[in-house]
Amino acid sequence: MPELPEVETIVRGLRTVLPGHTIVAVRLGKTDFIEDPSALGELLPGRRIEAVERIGKFIRLALSPGPAAKAPERQIDLIVHLGMTGWLGVRRPEDPVAPHTHTFFELEDGRELRYTDIRRFGQMLLVAGDQMAAFGERLGKEPLEISAGEFSQLLAGRHARIKALLLDQRIFRGIGNIYADESLWQARIHPARLAANLKSAEFGRLRKVIRRVLLRAIEDRGSSISNFVDAEGQPGEYQQRHRAYGREGKPCFRCGAKIRRVTVAGRSSFFCPRCQPAPRSKRAVRNALRTRG
DNA sequence: AGCTCTTCCTGAAAGC
DNA sequence: TGCTTTCAGGAAGAGC
């Protein structure tokens, strides 16, 4: 599933082949993941792709103002979220079309920017240039840029489980299930711990490992599960470094205990029961106090 | 505030 | 073996 490293990998690939090229036509297949399908054909032809950026898990194609006829003065951004199974890449027209390819942006040099998405949990929308700031403000901090102080401040005192907070895109942009679990394993923090109960050293550790895990995953061009491939069609390598995610029943790389799987924040959560001790329930705390007398 | 459940969708895996 | 059921999950919304 595309999270920050996978989206960054796609974006870096697109950045080498898209900027400077002009969209000349749009062809649509299924459109239920597109906010306003007809707007694509009406507003995009004639616009040049000026930049490709990642905003959390979103891909932003910054487009030039259009030709005179339609909303000419306005800069527009094409925003794409890959959801679970989305893929965006450039192909030649004669290249085979992958199943579930639903959007084709024809470029002036004959190539096509194609969007493929088996489950269509992705999203595609147009955002007017002057609305982009507002769009970005709905999202939280970029985890690769956040300072230690900001990190603690966002989490301290929150009574939600740390995993739920890591996944909340309004707090951090870009972290998903895999990298949340990998980071919590690295930091030796149980996913169900309440943020309010974490020590400041744990916040420090967590921020550091999130950064390390994400950077390393970007170097490895993402994790390839659920068929993820980059913009060129190549799989990533980071799944070989997974220490928790998808390893239920296998030995912990640190201590050998069997990795367990529980549901936290509605998501499968993999952790080491020995390295990542479970939070003590209120009842357990009460019993401990009573026993001590 | 924060949790669980539901919805969207398809293919893989489990169940019979 | 082969058909049927279940499950997974990013995000958003409902309801508690």
Image (cartoon, coloured by chain):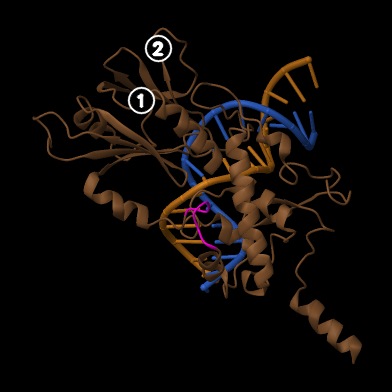
Chain colours: A brown, B blue, C orange
Q: Which residue sits furthest top?
A: A94
Residue A144 painted magenta: yes
Q: Which residue sits furthest left?
A: A69
Q: Image height check: is A64 above or below A182?
A: above
Residue marked by disc 2: A92
Q: Chain of mark 1?
A: A
Q: Chain of mark 2?
A: A
| Both labels 1 and 2 in a single chain | yes
Q: Give coordinates of residue A244: x percent, y percent.
A: 74, 46
Q: Mark 1 belongs to which amino acid? A: Leu
Upstream in the sequence, badge 1 or badge 2?
1
Name which quarter of the figure residue A92 lies in: top left
* Residue A227 shown left or right of residue A185 in the figure: left
Tell me where the magenta segment starts and ends, as one range.
Answer: A142-147
Residue at 65 percent of width and 59 percent of height: A206
Q: Image height check: is C3 above or below A56?
A: above
- Secondary structure under the numbered disc 1 in the rendered image: loop
Closest to the observer: A238 or A262?
A238
- Are the two marked residues, 1 and 2, in contact with CB atoms closer than 8 angstroms? no
Residue A246 painted magenta: no
* Residue A62 shown left or right of residue A92 in the figure: left
Name which quarter of the figure residue B14 lies in: top right
Magenta: main secondary structure: loop
Question: In which quadrant of the rendered image does the N terminus of chain A lie?
Answer: top right
Q: Mark 2 belongs to which amino acid? A: Arg
Q: Give coordinates of residue A207: x percent, y percent.
A: 61, 59
Question: In which quadrant of the rendered image does the C terminus of chain A lie?
Answer: bottom right
Residue marked by disc 1: A18
